[in-house]
Amino acid sequence: MLERFRPNEVAGSLDQVDLQKLQESGKKGIICDIDNTLLPWDQDIPEKRMVQWLEKASDRGIKVVLLSNALPRRARSLSKQLGIPARAQAVKPRRRGFKKALQILDLEPEEVAVVGDQLFTDIWGGNRMGMYTILVSPQDQKEFFSTKILRFLEMKIKKKLGLMA
Ligand SMILES: [Mg+2]
């Protein structure tokens, strides 16, 4: 029951995700969450180390698409800023948004890794799609109220899955 929330891998942050390892395991694309994965939800510009990580992915020929449950304005701005495609209002963990992201990447689910900070949206959604999932620690403690409530439950599941440091 809880296994659906278990990520294949855990990383401290997005820029700690090992691109070489992903590539060696046949991954050609990454579906990346925005809020608290790429940057804190209340900021507009990602840290330099995140931008550099995205550039490294691009240098390797790994395609990246941003997939967010938030409203389009922020996704559009980041897409423009970083020069990578983005989709908002994805309704993760539902499959539809992930399918759209796959179309953008032009890849199969097994060729794609999902990176995100939430078990109930990013990880569950990626697992449902048969994608490789990577959980990162949230970028910031400040969050939407609705997210905070979910975090409490998430914390319990993380403990049960042995994902807590
Ligand atoms: Mg997030």
Image (cartoon, rainbow, N blue to C red):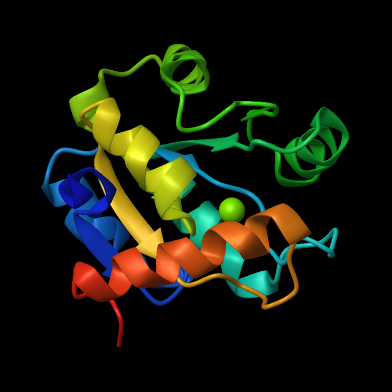
Say if 98 sits above or below 118 in the image. Answer: above
Give the number of callouts: 0
Residue 149 on image: x %, y %: 62, 61
Q: Is residue 68 visible?
A: yes
Quadrant of residue 103 within the rendered picture = top left
Quadrant of residue 87 within the rendered picture = top right
Q: Is residue 51 visible?
A: no
Say if 153 sits above or below 66 in the image. Answer: below
Closer to the camera in the image, 89 or 46: 89
Closer to the camera in the image, 67 or 107: 67
Closer to the camera in the image, 153 or 75: 153
Q: Is residue 97 left or right of residue 57?
A: right
Q: Is residue 78 left or right of residue 108?
A: right
Q: Is residue 61 left or right of residue 1?
A: right
Quadrant of the frame with the C terminus:
bottom left
Say if 27 sits above or below 105 in the image. Answer: below
Q: Extreme left residue here?
A: 25
Residue located at (71% from left, 45% from top): 82
Residue 51 on image: x %, y %: 63, 61
Q: Is residue 35 left or right of residue 72?
A: left
Residue located at (17% from left, 44% from top): 1
Residue located at (49% from left, 59% from top): 117
Quadrant of residue 157 within the rendered picture = bottom left
Say if 72 sits above or below 159 in the image. Answer: above
Residue 37 on image: x %, y %: 57, 60
